[in-house]
Image (cartoon, grey):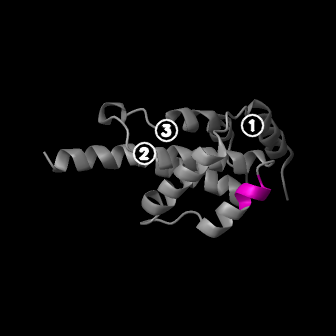
């Protein structure tokens, strides 16, 4: 049973969501980075299903949010200036904020859960990198 306030919050998040989706070749590169390096130890998404959904689900705001989060995570594994590592991926992550500000639904859809899990993966990538940097000094 979906509660009335959950529907209202879901619509509010979708109304506030104004994604700036990168070109497909950029998405493909960052998705590849995510699945080769960022989804190995704790697999959150199935690569084949995700890549097929890129062609069929881009009209679903929640899936687009997951794509942006995957791009954020994949950005963490690009060859960029090490001095900018603290900001890599944030421009993708910040766009998903409307979905992270609404209460978790009582009966979440798969995409709702994946939004939270991939968000957490992105946030933890900063913590993990800082621990790795400290341990090698």
Rendered location of residue 117, percent (x, y): 55, 54
Q: Earlier in the sequence, mark 1 or mark 3?
A: 1
Q: Which residue is mark 3?
A: 89
> Would residue 112 be counted in the magenta stretch?
no
Q: Please tell me whether mark 1 sits on a helix, a strand or a loop.
A: helix
Q: Is residue 108 in sight in this rendering? A: no
Q: Quadrant of residue 31?
A: bottom right
Q: Which residue is mark 2?
A: 76
- Per the image, the residue denoted by label 1 is 13
Asked if the residues shown at circle 1 and circle 3 are in contact, with their CB atoms under 8 angstroms apart, the answer is: no
The disc, 1 or 2, on the residue closer to the chain's N-terminal end is 1
Range of the magenta residues?
53-57
Q: Crowdedness of circle 3 by 10 Å Cα count: few (<14), some, many (20+)? A: many
Instruction: Work out whether residue 37 or residue 42 is closer to the camera in this orientation and state it.
Output: 37
Q: Main secondary structure of the magenta part?
A: helix
Which residue is at a point 46% across and 62% down the rendered structure image? Answer: 36
Q: Please name which of the two marks, 1 or 3, marks the residue nearer to the observer.
A: 3
Side of 98 where 82 appears, left or right: left
The answer to whether residue 15 shows anywhere in this view is: yes
Please give the name of the residue rendered at 59% of the width and 52% of the height, measured from the top-left corner: 28
Residues tagged 1 and 2 counted as in contact (Cβ below 8 A) = no
* Element under disc 2: loop
């Amino acid at each position: 049973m979906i509660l009335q306030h959950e529907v209202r919050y879901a619509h509010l998040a979708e109304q506030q969501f104004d994604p700036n989706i990168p070109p497909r070749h950029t998405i493909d590169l960052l998705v590849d980075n995510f699945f080769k390096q960022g989804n190995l130890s704790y697999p959150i998404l199935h690569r084949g299903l995700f890549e097929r959904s890129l062609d069929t689900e881009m009209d679903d705001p929640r899936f687009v949010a997951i794509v942006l989060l995957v791009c954020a995570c994949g950005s963490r594994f690009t060859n960029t200036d090490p001095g900018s590592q603290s900001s890599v991926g944030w421009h993708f992550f910040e766009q998903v904020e409307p979905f992270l500000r609404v209460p978790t639904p009582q009966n979440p859809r798969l995409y709702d859960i994946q939004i939270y899990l991939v968000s957490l993966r992105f946030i933890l990538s900063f913590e993990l990198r800082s621990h790795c940097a400290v341990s090698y000094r």
